[in-house]
Image (cartoon, helix red, strand yellow):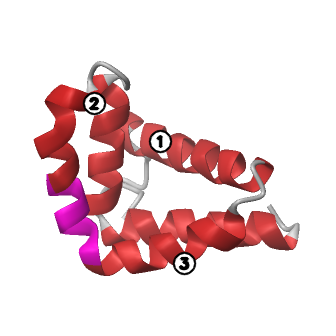
Amino acid sequence: GILGGDGVMSKRDAGQEQTREQWAERIHRSDLSVVIVPLLEVSRGLGFFASQALLLTQPVLEGLVKRESINRYVALFEDPAALESLIQRVERKAKGDG
């Protein structure tokens, strides 16, 4: 879960929450929610493979994308709960609740 054993969110978890919120906002602003949400839904089942593909292509991608960003995407795809959280955030924003 997001909260540690003492009920406090770690810096890492807080950073991941902020990252998901930023991604959801970008998706919402780009008006791509209708396309992105189904892709994210499919990614749930293929998340591990997507994360491994990112890791394999990391040397090529590093010329275009920061390593930190690649690592964030890998972490997202490897964690079904994080992916679900992103999907819910995007859907809330699309409905005007977020």
Q: Name the residue under label 3.
A: 38
Q: Which residue lies at the image location 25% right of the left edge and 61% below the top edge?
A: 50
Helix, strand or loop for the magenta stretch, by majority: helix
User: How packed is label 3: few (under 14 Cα within 10 Å), some, or many (20 or more)?
Assistant: few
Q: Mark 1 points at which residue?
A: 14
Residue beneath the point at 26% across and 23% down = 62
- Which of these two is toward me, 14 or 34? 34
Please report contact status of discs 3 and 1: CB closer than 8 Å, yes or no.
Answer: no
Left or right, 46 with respect to 7, comes to left
Give the amino acid type for the residue marked by disc 3 in the picture: Pro
The secondary structure type at the circle numbered 3 is: helix
Pointer 2: what residue?
A: 61
Residue 51 relative to residue 85: left or right: left
Magenta part of the protein: which range? 46-52
In which quadrant of the rendered view does residue 16 lie?
top left
Q: Which of marks 2 and 1 is nearer the N terminus?
A: 1
Image location of residue 5, percent across then percent down: 30, 58
Disc 2 to disc 1: CB gap under 8 Å: no
Quadrant in which the C terminus appears: bottom right
The image shows residue 76 at horizontal and vertical percentages of 35, 55
